Image: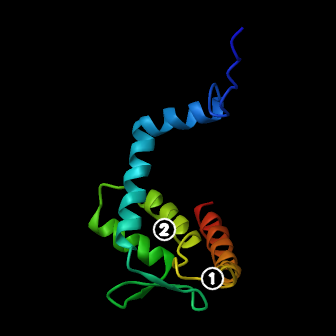
């Protein structure tokens, strides 16, 4: 009698299946393209979380909105909203690899209210 193979958590998983279908759809492809553009554009950028600015490689200190607009100006065929969404995502993951756990926690403590405030005000502006 053969052993029964344990089912992998991703096997027959509607959430994973839906995500994979979304990634293959035009909407998913556009989001992935925007993600790549944002992370490439911000590859050498830093963050001044206290002043709530993204510090670009050329020294320009821009807000989230200004950074999204700068990227969109170079790629007008990509949705500005998608770009902005991925700028927010970049900020959530921007800690340098050299940071200690304590430094990452401190950066997160400062960035989280910035992102919360930004999302709250941008949602209110859209209404």
Spot occupied by residue 121 in the image (x, y as percentages of width and height): 64, 72
Nearer the observer, disc 1 or disc 2? 1
Residue 37 quadrant: bottom left
Q: Residues within 10 Å of mark 2 (few under 14, many from 20)?
A: many
Residue 109 locus on image (x, y percent): 71, 81
Residue denoted by label 1: 100
Residue nearest the viewer, comparing 34 with 126 = 34
Mark closest to the chain's N terminus, 1 or 2: 2
Q: How is the image coloured?
A: rainbow
Q: What is the C-alpha distance between the residues marked 1 and 2?
A: 23 Å
Q: Quadrant of the N terminus?
A: top right
Is residue 79 visible in the rendered structure shown here? no
Image location of residue 45, percent across then percent down: 41, 81
Q: How many marks?
A: 2
Report the side of 94 relative to 59 (left or right). Answer: right
**On the picture, is 126 further left or further right than 39?**
right
**Figure check: 42 above or below 7:** below
Label 1 residue SS:
loop
Q: The residue tagged with tag 2: helix, strand or loop? A: helix
Q: Is residue 31 left or right of residue 18?
A: left
Residue drawn at 63 percent across, 63 percent down: 123
Q: Is residue 29 above or below residue 34?
A: above
Furthest toward the front, the residue is: 1
Residue at image location 46% in from the left, 83% down from the top: 46
Which residue is tagged 2? Answer: 87
Q: Is residue 34 visible?
A: yes
């Amino acid at each position: 009698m053969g052993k029964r193979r344990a089912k992998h958590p991703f096997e027959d998983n509607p959430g994973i299946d839906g995500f994979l279908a979304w990634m293959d759809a035009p909407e998913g492809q556009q989001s992935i393209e925007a993600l790549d553009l944002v992370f490439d554009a911000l590859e050498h950028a830093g963050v001044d979380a206290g002043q709530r600015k993204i510090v670009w490689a050329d020294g320009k200190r821009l807000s989230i909105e200004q950074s999204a607009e700068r990227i969109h100006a170079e790629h007008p065929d990509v949705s500005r909203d998608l770009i902005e969404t991925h700028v927010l995502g970049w900020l959530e993951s921007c800690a340098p690899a050299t940071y200690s756990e304590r430094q990452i926690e401190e950066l997160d403590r400062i960035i989280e209210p910035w992102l919360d405030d930004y999302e709250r005000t941008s949602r209110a502006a859209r209404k």
